[in-house]
Amino acid sequence: MENLMTVLEHFGLGTDFVKAEKMNSGQINLTMKIIYSDDEKYILQKINGSVFESPERVMHNIEKLSSVIPDMKIKFLCADNKNYVRIDNNYWRIYKYIENSISFEKFESNDMIYEFGKIIGKFHRDTAGADISLFHETIRDFHNIGKRIEKLFRLHDMLKSDDTDFFEMILSFYSRLESRNLKKIIVHNDIKCSNALFEKSSLKSITLIDFDTVMPGLSIFDFGDGVRSSCTTENAIDIEKYRYYCRGYFENMRCEDKENYFLGIVCIAGELACRYLYDVLSGENYFSAKTDEQKLARYCSLRKFVVSVVENRKAIDNILAEYEKAAFL
C-alpha cells in the first residue's frame, strides 16, 4: 500500500482514495482500479518486466500511437514528461477510467461481433499510414510462427504424431504467407474480446485497450485473432458470426486478397495452439494463471478451431470475396 501511495503522488494524484480494487483482466500486468470520493476513477497498472524486456519501449510505442490515432480514448497521465514512472525497478502507468464502459469475455450477440470487427478495422485504418520506423519491436519474434514451431519440434520425443502432423500443416500455411511479403503496419497484436470496450447502454464499440504489444506487424494476424476470439461455437468457426465480423471490419478496411485473411486466421490460431502446448511440455509456464490441464484443453480447442477453418474454407472465402470485389469497384 505504501508503494501505491508513492506511485499516485508521482502522477500528481491524491492518496485519499476510497477504494483500490484489483482487476482480473489480462494475464500479464497487475491492474487496479483507483476510486476517489468524488467518483473520479483511474486504471493503474504495473508493467510486467519479465515479459517486456524494455517497458520504456512499450510506453514509447503507446505515446507514438496516440499521435497516430486522432481520437485516442486511452490517455495516460504524465510524470516528469513521461507517460510512466519507475520506482524500485518497477514501471507504473495510469489512465482515466472510461465511464459507462464495459468489456466482455464473450459476446452476447452478432451485433456486438459486428461492432468488434468495426473497431479493429478502424484501428488498422488509423495506423495504416504511420511510419513504422518510429515504433520499437517490444517482444522479439512475437509472431515468428516458424521459430515457435521449430522450438516445439525440439521436444519431438514428447509430441504425438498427430500433433506433429498438425503443426506441419500450420508451417505449410505460414510458408505460403511468408512468400507473399505482405506490408507491415502498426498493429495491436493482442486482439481478443476482452480487449475492446463497449458503451454499457448502447453496446456500441468505443475503443480497443491494452496496447503493450503495439508494434509493426501484419494486420491479418489481428484480423485472425478477432475471428478466433469472437466467431466460434463449440470450438469451431461459426460462419454466421464470421459474416457479421467481416461486415464490421471491412466497413473500415479494404479487402485486397481473400487468401491473406484465411492464412491470417489459420496461422495466428495455430501459433497460439503451439504456445499453449509448448508451455506444458517445456515447463516454461508463460500462461501462469492456468493449470497444465487447462492449457492442454485450450490447445485442443484451438486445434479443433483451426481444423474447422480449413474445412470451411469455401464458405470463408465466399464471404471475403464479397468485400474483395467491393474494394475494386
Image: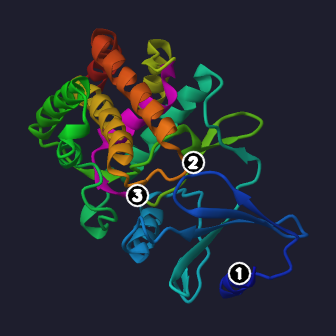
- Residue sitting farthest toward the right: 37
Is residue 129 among the parts visible in the rendering? Answer: no
Residue interval drawn in magenta: 213-233
Q: Is residue 172 rendered magenta in the image?
A: no
Q: Is residue 218 rendered magenta in the image?
A: yes
Name which residue type carries label 3.
Thr
- Closer to the camera in the image, 11 or 161: 161
Q: Earlier in the sequence, mark 2 or mark 1?
A: 1
Q: Is residue 141 above or below residue 203?
A: below
* 265 sits to left or right of 260: right
Please give the name of the residue rendered at 59% of the width and 66% of the height, measured from the top-left corner: 75
Q: Which residue is mark 2?
A: 207
- Closer to the camera in the image, 113 or 271: 271
Q: Which residue is mark 3?
A: 213
Q: Is residue 73 above or below residue 238?
A: below
Q: Position of residue 55 (x, y in %)?
A: 43, 73
Q: Position of residue 269 (x, y in %)?
A: 35, 33
Q: Quadrant of residue 324?
A: top left
Q: Residues within 10 Å of mark 3 (few under 14, many from 20)?
A: many
Q: Earlier in the sequence, mark 2 or mark 3?
A: 2
Q: Which residue is mark 1?
A: 8
For the C terminus, the image quarter is top left
Please give the name of the residue rendered at 50% of the width and 53% of the height, measured from the top-left corner: 288
Please give the name of the residue rendered at 32% of the width and 42% of the height, measured from the top-left corner: 219
Name which residue type carries label 2.
Thr
Q: Earlier in the sequence, mark 1 or mark 3?
A: 1
Q: Secondary structure at mark 3?
A: loop
> Do labels 2 and 1 touch, CB within 8 Å?
no
